[in-house]
Amino acid sequence: MSNQLNFSGGPGALPASVLRQAQEAIAALPETGISVLGMSHRSAWFRGVLDEAEANLRALLDIPAGYHVLFLQGGGSLQFSMLPMNFLRGTGKAADYIVSGYWSAKTPIEARLEGPVRIVWDGQSDGFRRLPHADELALSPDAAYLHYVANETVEGLEFQGIPGLAGVPLLCDMSSNLLAAPIDVARYDVIYAHAQKNLGPSGVTLVILRDELAQRGAPGLPSLLDYRSHIAARSIYNTPPVFAIYVLMLVTRWLCDEVGGLEAMAALNRTKAATLYAAIDAAPDFYRGHAERSFRSTMNAAFRLPDPATETLFLEAARREGFYGLEGHRSLGGVRASLYNAVTLEAVHTLAEWMTDFARRRG
Ligand code: PMP
């Protein structure tokens, strides 16, 4: 299947077994005989899909009691707005934001529409090549919350530790690394991730939200933008993306039953990343990684070649070889290989070997 050489930054590769089931479900679901695209979101079948997706996520991530698991729309970007609408508006406090890359740089812009914002660290002047150390963060104990992006998809920077102060709600965008490894959910008040990296197709965004924070949301919000509406309606406040949620459920089932959980997934992801970075580091005069080594992401490896002409040659040759989606993000250029959960170790070996060979021939 050509899908197995998909290194796109997102929407990304999905597991081959999930794609086969999705294909069958479009014709007719084995359970109902009806196409998944024509199934009512109010059906008992779909309630079962939502319940299984939530149960699998609770098992995989060890989500404690007291957290809601919501399936929303609007992508990661709507969360940039919904979070400050619910938890900054009218508090009389300021919210703390870490700006560590292309995606987190967008977050305070939306928050400022709702209230005062403090940028507690900004990596722009360093070209977003590294992440802050804990002692560099100017955090405030009276902040409405602290927001950060756990994995910067464009630059390939991934936090190793968890920033924050006890007593200040912690809100985190994990769009590009959720379900890649175990995490300690109890350290967070909100975790969100759009589906189109590790969770499924685009169209659905997972939000894991502490009930105690949700109930303190601002009054008077439009229903669709108020987390409490979605909690009360158990993710069916309005018509949800049934197909996307169905595929997300299949991905969680794949993680539980075929992969064997997030420890196993993390071990495989570490091997994949080590394989690719080894190919980059073995040709230091040809490939130059964007991120400083200790901040390298297991999910996205962004790198440059000696000059733009060689990068173009590389990308053209890669496309001919069957590697899809290696172009760097439009804001950064260069090359980016995304190694999401469904990208196999075999695919990464194939890419790494081809890169080594390319550097030998062109370097
Ligand atoms: N956050 C991160 C970390 C992302 O990588 C992206 C997009 N790739 C977004 C947010 C924006 O997501 P969306 O396009 O779903 O709004």
Image (cartoon, rainbow, N blue to C red):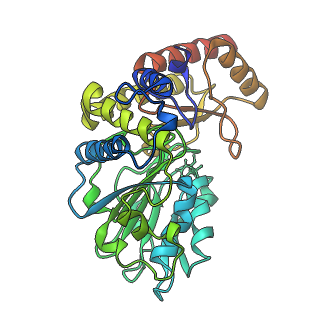
In the picture, residue 356 is in which quadrant?
top right
* Residue at x 34%, y 47% (from the top left corner): 47
Q: Kindly give the residue lying farthest to the bottom in the view shown.
A: 92
* Residue at x 29%, y 73% (from the top left corner): 212
* Residue at x 41%, y 50% (from the top left corner): 42
Q: Position of residue 267 (x, y in %)?
A: 30, 31
Residue nearest the observer in this picture, 96 or 203: 203
* Residue at x 50%, y 82% (from the top left corner): 220
Along the horizontal axis of the image, is 335 left or right of 140?
Answer: right
Quadrant placement of the C terminus: top right
Residue 298 seen in render: no
Q: Position of residue 348 (x, y in %)?
A: 47, 21
In the picture, residue 227 is in which quadrant?
bottom left
Q: Kindly give the residue lying farthest to the right in the view shown.
A: 309
Along the horizontal axis of the image, is 328 left or right of 337?
Answer: right
Q: 215 above or below 297?
A: below
Residue 349 seen in render: yes
Q: How many marks?
A: 0
Q: Position of residue 61 (x, y in %)?
A: 27, 47
